Amino acid sequence: MTWVVALGGLVLLVFLHELGHFWVARAVGMRPRSFYVGFPPALVKVRWNGIEYGIGMIPLGGLVRIPGMHRPAARDLRAMTEPAVREQPSLAPVVGAVRRALDAENYDLARQAYPELERELGAASLSAGARRSAARGLRDVEEGTAPEAYWRAPTWKRVAVIAAGPLANVAIAFLILFYVFAVAGGPSQRPTSTVANVKAGAPAAAAGLEVGDRVVAVNGQAIGTFSDASRLIRSSRGGPVTLTVLRGGQRVTVGPRPTVRENGRWIFGFSPAAKLVTYPPVKAARISVSDLWGVVTGTATGIKGLFSSQGRSQLSGPPGIVRVEHTELQVGLPYYLEILAFVSMSLALLNLLPLLPLDGGHILFSLIEAVRRRALAREVYERVSVVGFALILLLLVIASSNDLSGGAH
């Protein structure tokens, strides 16, 4: 069940990110055509009020399809309708009429000519491939010439729609942390006797100690605090140690296993969870902001670290994130929520990188188009996106490798 909750938290963050785009797009008059959690093809979909809602088969993100992201161009329509025209030459005049309007950048005329093109293509006898390609061309013309098309909107509206996703994640991160510190209790500097981490390969792991166990005795001697347990373990000087723990309401014996010497100390190989403390609202808000700023500075350091093998080894992808969330959830809900807040903030920062197809890349290109006072062509976006996709894919490969090898913690 904890795995389901951990994965569900990540999916929820993606959903709320896309909901930010969706809600602001509707608020500024850009009616989205679809809203997906995950990427198509669809597992489940439904159409309501002209918008397609669905869950995609590729669970790596989400999608809000906003009409007319790119300026429609005659060459794009030609490329997409060329197979249909080859199979049905009688389509050439009506396709040509729309193309000429697009060439002249008369988008209102192109929109007026669109219904006839749609009718002719619908009545034509075409192969499945030609029909799919032509349908995509039709969709681009219809959406790109619409009054609510993204590329035609003022810069502030475009930036607002794109920035809404990352800003939603920032707001979610703050609200989660505020709840933790003001209500649920945030981790303090004081340790408890509950196990938060078990070191791989250490005696504790070999003995079967688990995250979430609460240590109540060491070698049969009752302990009240983690300091008591630590003192007894260190005094073993390499001898066997047996822990008595509470696990799921039951007393469980772990060990015996001999301790090992590390950095001049005899250890069993586990670390404790921190005592949870609540704060007044103002202080809780201040701590929340401070922690989120720590994510910002940590992300900047991490980006610099990508140029070193050690820095790359710290990357983690969705499987690694879910694994960490699962571990923290075993310790306690506040620990899980804190990690979820940090993931939400990291998701916002990642999306604000100035790379297409990330949100930061779209914001950058909107500002470039505002300066040049003219929308860039689709092929410019596509060429730059290839570079962005390659970099993102490289990071995903590195992160996945770390997740599989257990190198990211």
Image (spheres, grey):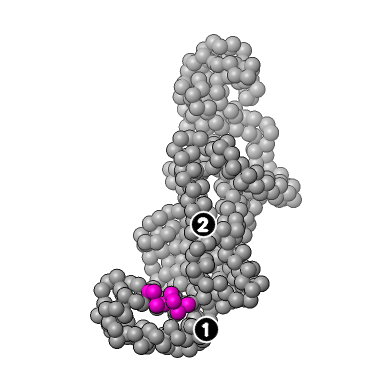
- Give me the C-alpha separation between circle 2 and circle 1: 29 Å
Q: Which residue is drawn at 48% across and 89% down?
A: 109
In this image, 265 relative to 321: left or right?
Answer: right
Q: Which residue is drawn at 62% across and 25% down?
A: 226
Q: Residue at x 49, y 43 (%)?
A: 398
Q: Which stretch did the figure color magenta?
A: 73-80
Q: Is the magenta stretch mostly helix, strand or loop?
A: helix
Q: Do the residues labelled 2 and 1 touch (CB within 8 Å)?
A: no
Identified by mark 2, the residue type is Val
- Residue 269, percent across and down? 55, 23
Q: Residues within 10 Å of mark 2 (few under 14, many from 20)?
A: some
| Sequence-earlier tag: 2 or 1 | 1
Quarter of the figure that contains the N terminus? top left
- Residue 14, percent across and down? 51, 56
Q: Which residue is at the front of the view, 56 or 255? A: 56
In the rendering, which numbered label is found on residue 387? 2
Which residue carries the number 1 mark? 105
Quarter of the figure that contains the C terminus? top right
Asked whether residue 172 appears in the rendered view, the answer is no
In this image, 75 relative to 153: left or right?
Answer: left
Identified by mark 1, the residue type is Glu
Residue 303 in the magenta stretch? The answer is: no
Q: Which residue is at the front of the view, 387 or 267? A: 387
